[in-house]
Image (spheres, rainbow, N blue to C red):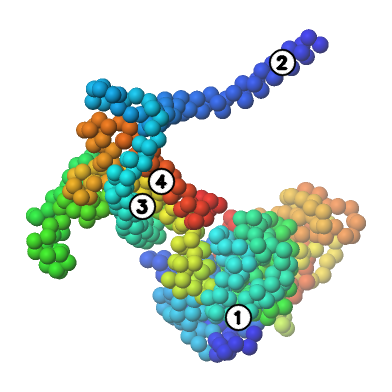
C-alpha cells in the first residue's frame, strides 16, 4: 500500500533495550535488527523476555532503557495507536460484541479509510473465510478465530505484524496447517512478521531468521539451519532439537580441524564450528547424524568405541537408541530404519561414528544441560 | 421373562422419579412465591376495585368491581406519580455517573486493593438503611460540611437550606442505591478481557475511542442490570422522601403508605400499587428492548 508513512517503513531496530519489573529484569540490554519484509521468530522458554519484547514493540509496555525504531522513526515513546504496528494476540482478543466484519473493519474505521468494504472482503478471501462476515466471534472455531485475528491485523497493512504465540491454542494438526498458511500469507502480503513462540519446530518451519532468547538476552540469532547445525551455546544446542554434548580437550590441530580428546578417544571438530574459549570444550553432535554399528565394524570419520545399547525404542521412521559410553554418559542416536540389516538390541556392544563436519564445539565451562529442562517443561 | 419385566418397570419408575426431580427442587420456591407473591397480589387486585361499605366502619370495604378507582387514584396523585419517576430517574443517572468510574477503577486500576474496595462498597449494608438515611439530615444540615461549601461557592443563597428538599431526597436515593449500581457494573467490567482493550489500542483507537467502542459496549449488561436495580426500588421508595423531604417532595410510595396506614383507604393504595407496578414493567421492557443486550447478558 503506497501510503504517506513511507518514513515509518523499514527495518525494526531495537537498541539497547532493557525492561525491568521491580527487581526482575525481563529484557536485558537487547539489541536486534529485524530486516524489512522478513519473517522473524523470537524463540525461547516462557519467562525469557520474548513476549515483553513484543509488547514493547507494540507499545503496550514502555522500555526502562533504550530505544525502538522503525526505519528512521523513533517509536519508543509513542502510543500503541500511533504505531504502524499490528498484533495478533495470544488468545486473539477479538471484540466479542462486534461481527467478524466489524472486527476486521475496526482498524480501518479508526484511520478513516474509505473503501472499508472492499478491504475487508479482500482480506476475508485471503484467509478463506468470506462466508463468516456476519457471525460473532463466539460462533467461530479456534482455527477460524485465529485467521480472523490475523485478518484484522493485516488488513491495516502495517509496517510490522507482531504475532504472540498465535498458534498456541490450536491442536497439533491445525497448528501445522496454519504454520504453512501463515508463511504463505507473509510471502503474499510482504509485511515484516515478528513471531514470538516457545515452539522450536514452529519457529523453524516459518521463520527466515530466529533469535533464541534466554533470560532477557539473545543467545544466538541466525537462519534455522545455522542455529541447528552450528549452535554457539549449550542452551541453543539443547533448546533447538536435541544434542549430545561430550566433555573434551583440544589437543592439537589438523588442517581446518581441531583434534579433541574425549575420554581417551580422538575426534575432529571443524574450526568454523568451534565456539570454545580455550582448550576445554563440549563436543556436540546431533543424534540423527550418528551412525551406529555392531562393535568391531570398521568405520570412518569421528569414531567412538565401547558403547553398549541401554535402550532402544522403535518409532516407525527411526529407532532411537540410548548408548552408554565407557565414561557412563548416555548418548542419543536416531537411526533411520532404511537399511534392512539385523536390528540392534538392548545390551549390544556398538561403535558410533559420524562425519567430522557435523560436530560443533562449545565452551567447556557451559552447563551441558542448559535449555534441555526448560524445553521438557514446555512440551 | 418375569425378571425382564420387573427390571423394565424398575427402569421406568426410576425415569419417573427423575422427571419429577426438577419439580421437587422447584417446589419450595414455588410454594414461597405462591404464598407470598401470587396470593397477596390477587388479594391486592381484589382490594383495588372495592368501595366503602355504605354506613360501615372506617376501613371496611366490599367488592363492587369499581375500576374507576384506578382513574381516581391516578388523577388525585398525578404529581407524586411523575415525581417518583423523575426522582428515580435522577437518582439512577447520578448513581451511574458515580458508580461507573468507581467500578472501572476497582476492576482495572485497584491492583491488590480490589477486594478491600469491594468490601467498602458493600460495607454500608452493615448498618441500618434508616440510620444511614437519617445521617444525611446531618450531612446536609446547617452544621454539616456540604452547606458551607455550597454557600461559599454561591451555588445556593445564604438563607437556602438543603434539608427537607428535593435535592436531599434525590441525594438520599442516589446514596442508598449506589451499591446496587456499582456491583453489577463491576461484575461486567471485570469480565472484560483486558486484551480486547489492548487490541483496540493496537488497532488505532485512542483511550477515549477504546472506551466508547469496546469497554462501554462490553459493560452494557452491567449498566442495564445496575440501572434496573436502582431505578425500580427508587421509584417505589418512600423512606428517603419521608426522612429527607418535605410535603412537596412526596413520592408515590409515601402516598401508598399514608393511604394504607393512616387513611385506611385500601382500594386507592392498592390501585396506586398496581399502577406503579405496571408503569415500571412497561418502562423496563421498553428499556431492555432498546438496550438490545439480551444476547450479551
Q: Residue at x 71, y 67 (%)?
A: A130
Query: Pointer 2: what residue?
Result: B9
Label 2 neighbourhood size at 10 Å, few (<14), some (14-19), many (20+)? Answer: few
| Residue ranking furthest to the top | B2
User: Do the CB atoms of the residues marked 2 and 1 lie less than 8 Å apart?
Assistant: no
What residue is shown with label 3? Answer: B182
Disc sitting over residue A114 in the figure: 1
Residue depicted at x 24% and y 46%: B250
| Chain for numbered disc 3 | B
Looking at the image, which is closer to me, A114 or B182? A114
Nearer the camera: disc 2 or disc 1? 1
Sequence-wise, which precedes: disc 2 or disc 4? 2
| Circle 4: element type | helix
| Residue A21 screen position, x and y as percent | 40, 67
Among the two numbered marks 2 and 3 on one chain, the one whose residue lies closer to the N terminus: 2
Estimate the spatial distance between the alpha carbons at disc 1 and disc 4, rounded to whole Å. Answer: 46 Å
Expressed as whole percent of the image width and height from the top left, the position of residue B273 reads 35, 38
Sequence-wise, the earlier of marks 3 and 4 is 3
Same chain shared by disc 3 and disc 4:
yes
Q: CA distance from mark 1 to mark 3?
A: 40 Å
Q: CA distance from mark 2 to mark 4?
A: 53 Å
Tell which subunit mark 1 falls on.
A
Disc 4 designates what residue? B279
Judge by depth and name the residue closer to the eye, B180 or B80.
B80
* Tag 1 and tag 4 share a subunit: no
Nearer to us: label 2 or label 4: 4
* SS at circle 1: loop
- Sort mark 3 into few (<14), some (14-19) or many (20+) by Cα contacts within 10 Å: many
Amino acid at each position: 500500500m503506497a501510503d504517506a508513512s513511507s518514513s515509518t517503513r523499514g527495518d525494526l531496530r531495537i537498541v539497547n533495550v532493557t525492561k525491568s519489573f521491580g527487581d526482575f529484569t525481563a529484557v536485558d540490554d537487547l539489541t536486534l535488527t529485524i530486516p524489512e519484509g522478513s519473517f522473524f521468530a523470537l524463540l525461547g522458554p516462557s519467562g525469557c523476555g520474548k513476549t515483553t519484547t513484543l509488547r514493547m514493540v507494540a507499545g503496550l509496555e514502555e522500555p526502562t532503557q533504550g530505544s525502538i525504531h522503525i526505519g528512521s522513526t523513533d517509536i519508543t515513546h509513542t502510543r500503541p495507536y500511533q504505531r504502524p504496528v499490528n498484533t495478533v494476540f495470544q488468545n486473539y482478543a477479538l471484540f466479542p460484541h462486534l461481527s467478524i466484519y466489524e472486527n476486521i473493519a475496526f482498524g480501518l474505521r479508526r484511520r478513516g479509510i474509505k473503501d472499508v468494504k472492499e478491504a475487508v472482503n479482500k482480506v476475508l478471501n485471503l484467509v478463506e473465510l468470506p462466508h463468516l462476515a456476519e457471525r460473532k466471534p463466539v460462533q467461530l472455531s479456534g482455527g477460524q478465530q485465529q485467521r480472523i485475528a490475523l485478518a484484522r491485523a493485516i488488513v491495516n497493512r502495517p509496517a510490522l505484524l507482531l504475532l504472540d504465540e498465535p498458534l498456541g491454542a490450536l491442536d497439533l494438526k491445525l497448528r501445522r496447517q496454519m504454520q504453512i498458511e501463515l508463511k504463505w500469507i507473509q510471502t503474499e502480503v510482504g509485511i515484516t512478521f515478528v513471531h514470538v513462540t516457545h515452539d522450536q519446530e514452529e519457529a523453524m518451519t516459518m521463520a527466515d531468521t530466529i533469535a533464541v532468547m534466554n533470560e532477557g538476552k539473545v543467545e544466538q540469532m541466525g537462519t534455522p539451519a545455522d542455529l541447528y547445525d552450528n549452535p554457539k551455546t549449550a542452551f541453543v544446542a539443547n533448546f533447538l532439537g536435541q544434542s549430545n554434548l561430550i566433555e573434551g580437550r583440544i589437543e592439537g590441530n589438523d588442517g581446518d580441524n581441531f583434534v579433541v580428546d574425549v575420554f581417551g578417544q580422538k575426534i575432529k571438530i571443524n574450526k568454523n564450528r568451534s565456539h570454545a574459549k580455550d582448550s576445554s570444550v563440549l563436543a556436540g553432535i546431533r543424534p540423527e547424524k550418528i551412525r551406529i554399528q555392531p562393535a568391531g565394524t570398521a568405520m570412518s570419520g569421528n569414531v567412538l568405541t565401547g558403547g553398549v545399547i541401554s535402550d532402544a525404542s522403535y518409532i516407525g521412521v527411526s529407532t532411537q537408541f540410548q548408548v552408554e559410553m565407557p565414561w557412563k554418559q548416555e548418548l542419543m542416536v536416531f537411526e533411520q530404519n532404511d537399511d534392512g540389516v539385523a536390528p540392534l538390541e538392548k545390551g549390544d556392544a556398538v561403535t558410533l561414528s559420524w562425519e567430522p563436519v557435523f560436530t560443533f564445539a562449545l565452551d567447556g565451562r557451559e552447563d551441558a544441560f542448559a535449555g534441555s529442562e526448560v524445553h521438557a517443561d514446555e512440551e | 421373562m418375569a425378571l425382564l419385566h420387573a427390571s423394565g418397570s424398575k427402569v421406568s419408575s426410576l425415569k419417573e422419579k427423575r422427571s419429577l426431580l426438577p419439580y421437587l427442587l422447584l417446589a419450595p420456591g414455588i410454594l414461597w412465591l405462591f404464598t407470598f407473591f401470587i396470593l397477596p397480589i390477587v388479594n391486592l387486585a381484589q382490594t383495588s376495585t372495592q368501595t366503602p361499605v355504605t354506613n360501615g366502619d372506617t376501613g371496611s370495604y366490599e367488592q363492587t368491581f369499581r375500576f374507576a378507582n384506578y382513574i381516581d387514584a391516578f388523577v388525585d396523585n398525578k404529581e407524586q406519580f411523575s415525581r417518583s419517576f423523575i426522582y428515580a430517574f435522577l437518582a439512577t443517572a447520578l448513581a451511574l455517573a458515580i458508580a461507573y468510574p468507581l467500578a472501572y477503577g476497582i476492576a482495572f486500576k485497584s491492583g491488590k486493593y480490589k477486594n478491600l474496595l469491594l468490601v467498602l462498597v458493600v460495607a454500608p449494608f452493615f448498618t441500618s438503611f434508616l440510620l444511614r438515611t437519617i445521617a444525611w439530615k446531618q450531612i446536609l444540615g446547617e452544621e454539616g460540611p456540604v452547606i458551607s461549601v455550597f454557600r461559599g461557592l454561591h451555588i445556593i443563597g445564604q438563607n437556602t437550606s438543603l434539608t427537607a428538599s428535593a435535592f436531599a431526597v434525590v441525594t438520599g436515593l442516589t446514596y442508598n442505591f449506589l451499591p446496587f449500581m456499582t456491583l453489577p457494573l463491576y461484575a461486567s467490567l471485570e469480565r472484560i478481557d483486558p486484551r480486547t482493550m489492548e487490541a483496540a489500542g493496537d488497532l488505532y483507537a485512542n483511550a477515549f475511542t477504546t472506551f466508547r467502542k469496546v469497554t462501554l459496549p462490553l459493560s452494557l449488561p452491567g449498566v442495564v442490570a445496575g440501572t434496573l436495580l436502582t431505578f425500580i426500588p427508587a421509584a417505589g421508595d418512600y423512606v428517603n422522601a419521608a426522612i429527607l423531604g418535605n410535603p412537596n417532595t412526596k413520592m408515590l410510595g409515601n402516598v401508598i403508605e399514608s393511604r394504607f396506614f393512616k387513611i385506611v383507604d385500601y382500594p386507592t393504595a392498592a390501585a396506586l400499587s398496581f399502577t406503579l407496578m405496571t408503569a415500571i414493567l412497561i418502562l423496563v421492557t421498553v428499556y431492555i428492548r432498546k438496550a438490545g443486550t439480551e444476547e450479551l447478558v
